[in-house]
Image (spheres, grey):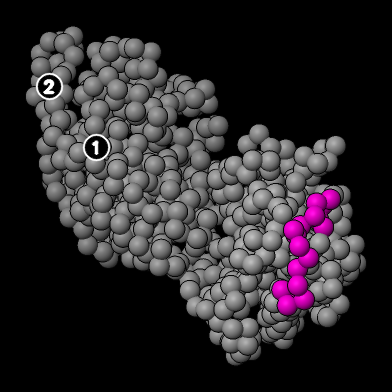
Amino acid sequence: MLKLTVDEMIGRIERGITFNAEAKDGSFKLKIEEYTAYICAAVHNGAKLRPDLLENCLLTQQERWYEEDPHTSDFIKDLPIVMEGLDSRYEYDLNREPAQAIYDTAWGKTVWKNAITPQQREVSLQKHEGFYKVLETLVQKIETKFGACLVFDIHSYNHKRWNRDTPLFNLGTVNVDNVRFGKVISKWVSSLGKMEFPDTENETAINDVFFGKGYLLSNLTNKFENTLVLATEVKKVYCDEDSGELYPQMISLIQKQFKGAIHNSVKLFARTHTSLKVVKRSHLLSAELEQNIIDVDRQLFHLVRNFEILYYINPINIESEKKKFFNSKFKVNPTFKYRSLLIDPFEFKSALYNIQVNQILDPEIRQLYQSCINAYADKVDILSSIGTQKFLYNSLRYFGEPNAKDLANAQYLMYSPEPASSKFEENLSDKDAEEIFRQTVAEYGFECKIETVPNLASKALVLNSTKTVRIKKGAKFSEKSVAALAHHEIGVHMVTTINARLQTLNLMRLGMPLNTLTQEGLAVLSEYLSGNVTIKRLKELALRVMAIQLMLQDKDFSQVFAYLVEEGKMDTNAAYYLTARIFRGGGFTKDYLYLRGFRNVLLYYLEGHSLDNLLIGKTSLQYIDTLNSLVERKILLPPKYKTTAYEQPVENSEILNFIISGIR
């Protein structure tokens, strides 16, 4: 970080130069990643006292901490312009006018053993003056550039001293123009009020515990006609205000949600009070990709780039065990064998957790990587327990299990009518399927491997790490089913694989948390919109849900197989492979996500949302707002390749549409 004098900072601001620097006297920091229409400030975040003052101070560090606003800069630190006080308010209070900025007594306590000298006061007041010289220059620059400036003045407060319930957020507005800026004020209060925290009630108020009478607000309001200061107090629910113990999860949640709330308010302010006519998120948030993100991304990718969970979970003897199962007249359950794990689970997880993800400043991106690392740790637990009783537990921990709605949808589809005209003869071979897949790839215009291999539990799958489509050797297909598979495997799974490789961040290749649900939902939607999903296919997805439920009820392989044949009307071949999918590894619960994912993505599509940003890699609908933000900020690229079925959907039969409309 640069060390700059006040005059050097002012010179850079006047020339429109971005920088990240600490004042040479150590009194404050200023980060300008991009000149935007707003500033975030945390003037009481600091806790430093000069040695000569510290020696003379009667208050303990904890007593000083109690009245400071620790970690308020964390709430705003990833935004484009942040000004942060580093000195304790007991040296000089930046939120009081200079004549009142140095305490002799504060909150009923004498501060100094001996009265501080005029020289000591002068040093402190010079720091106070330097802070405001820089801040006022910055506000002037923004007003000149955009016509107006919005300042978020963030503080915290101790709530235990109040003998009543107090708000989680308090906005002080007595000294601002509530008529002129009323809509922006309402938007900020509304956005704060929508923030959600576990076990914490969010009451957001105006002029309840504080009124906005601080010097930062009054000084800027008096000097700049077109600047609005939102003086905001945060209740100290993110720490124990008595002991000083911090609650990192709460700090992270406030930080993440503050970003969205600030964006919502700035967007309205920029549209109604500045010269910006078109206001996009990318105009309001930094587009700079910090080095810490790049470092974490590379470390994670290097560690897990060849990690393919299906490669290890697919049995290597699925065909020979099928022969034995059929010869026993479906009585002797298969005993599957698996590839040896080529990693040490303990060392692998240690390496994962040694990645310094906490160094990432941007909370949205940091949370993505934290969640991704946790997901891979869970996957390691799954792989390390293949063939043991722990496997099912680990699968449930990662993928979950069908809920009541999933089971209701599955039963609904199982008993939906299937017209005789919907029967399709499986007259195509694995070689035919391979040729159709190659034609599909050629139409998209990218390159990937296509190979036919034995011992697959499914008829086709994509290996992301090697850009490979695998087709099951000896499998038979109908024209409809092979077309559906092409739209499923090539049109979604390979499209997202190729798009992910075009991104700067490898995270899109590795997969966002919960991406299975979304990716399989997108793939089934592609089958549907291409006109190739059938009622038989929907019933198969439903039977996967029911089969998993039976397995979780302690039904064994042969019992689940019998259910699929007798109740599900499946032929014995198809029933065997579906049962094998469910029981591989020791109980693999992933397959119920296909139906749930299809429902979620279909509803999202029918609401009129674009699916484009879900195609940029192995994405998750849960993180769609973050994805949209990162694409707008040009941190992620929009998809080069788009699913044909989404671009050119075809009309399905009325009965199929009617049945699908009944999925809840």
Q: Which mark is residue 321?
A: 2
Q: Position of residue 93 (x, y in %)?
A: 75, 66
* Residue 110 in view in this figure: yes
Judge whether 556 appears above or below 533 on screen.
above
Residue type (three-letter) at the residue carrying disc 2: Glu
The residues tagged by marks 1 and 2 sit, at their Cα atoms, a distance apart of: 28 Å
Q: Quadrant of residue 7?
A: bottom right
Magenta region: 105-121
Q: Identify the residue at image location x=25%, y=43%.
A: 348
Residue type (three-letter) at the residue carrying disc 1: Pro
Q: Which residue occupies the foreground of this view, 586 or 473?
A: 586
Looking at this rendering, what residue extends furthest in the front direction? 114
Q: Identify the residue at image location x=40%, y=29%.
A: 397
Q: Which residue is mark 1?
A: 345
SS label for mark 2: helix
Q: Is residue 195 left or right of residue 549?
A: right
Q: Position of residue 59 (x, y in %)?
A: 70, 52
